């Protein structure tokens, strides 16, 4: 199995907290890849569940990019996200996803994307100075601030 590092980031827009950006950065040896996107808070979630939604999307997109089973080191600034990926999702699955909260649809999708991989987690501090995390944060910020005025209405 390949050993891959997946770093994720999510940001809610300062100008309009209804908009947010997510990003991931993948590293396999000397190879790397990245992805990012923007999401409008169409569900009208409070800021915390919306930010969690962005974080989950970043992990899903990163895992979906992997075409073969891998040993993945998932690195995030979100302790809750890491706990949910490493343990809570298994309990939620057994209980029929009843206690997974607001973002059940995404937790189920993440669970499906994670199924073929072995995932270990690592919490990283915002001020760690990690260049891959900085790149990931920059990607998420650029997406969060992209929305034109006519789109955010």
Image (spheres, rainbow, N blue to C red):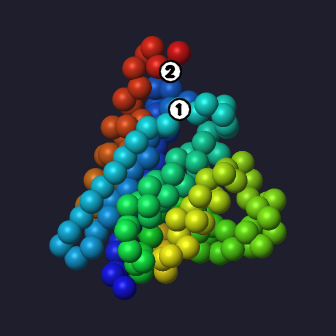
Of all residues shown, which one is farthest toward the front? 67
Q: Are marks 2 and 1 in contact (CB under 8 Å)?
A: yes
Q: Residue at x 46, y 26 (%)?
A: 15
Q: Which residue is mark 1?
A: 40
At numbered mark 1, what does the secondary structure look like: helix, strand or loop?
Answer: strand
Q: Quadrant of residue 34?
A: bottom left
Q: Which residue is mark 2?
A: 152
Q: Residue at x 49, y 37 (%)?
A: 39
Q: Quick one: quadrant of the N terminus?
A: bottom left
Report if residue 129 is visible in the image.
no
Q: Is residue 119 above or below residue 13?
A: below
Q: Earlier in the sequence, mark 2 or mark 1?
A: 1
At numbered mark 2, what does the secondary structure look like: helix, strand or loop?
Answer: helix
Whole-percent x, y for residue 132 in the image? 28, 61
Whole-percent x, y for residue 63 in the image? 44, 64
Of all residues shown, which one is farthest toward the bottom? 1
> Along the horizontal axis of the image, is 4 left or right of 54?
left
Whole-percent x, y for residue 122 in the image? 46, 73
């Amino acid at each position: 199995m390949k050993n891959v590092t997946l770093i994720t980031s999510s940001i809610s827009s300062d100008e309009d907290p209804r908009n947010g950006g997510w990003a991931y950065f993948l590293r396999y040896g000397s190879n790397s890849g990245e992805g990012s996107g923007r999401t409008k808070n169409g569900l009208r979630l409070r800021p915390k569940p919306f930010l969690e939604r962005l974080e989950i999307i970043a992990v899903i997109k990163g895992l979906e990019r992997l075409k073969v089973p891998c040993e993945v080191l998932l690195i995030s600034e979100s302790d809750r996200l890491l706990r949910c990926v490493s343990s809570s999702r298994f309990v939620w699955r057994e209980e029929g996803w009843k206690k997974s909260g607001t973002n059940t649809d995404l937790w189920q999708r993440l669970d499906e994307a994670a199924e073929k991989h072995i995932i270990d987690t690592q919490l990283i501090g915002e001020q760690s100075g990690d260049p891959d995390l900085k790149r990931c944060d920059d990607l998420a910020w650029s997406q969060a601030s992209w929305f034109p005025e006519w789109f955010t209405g």
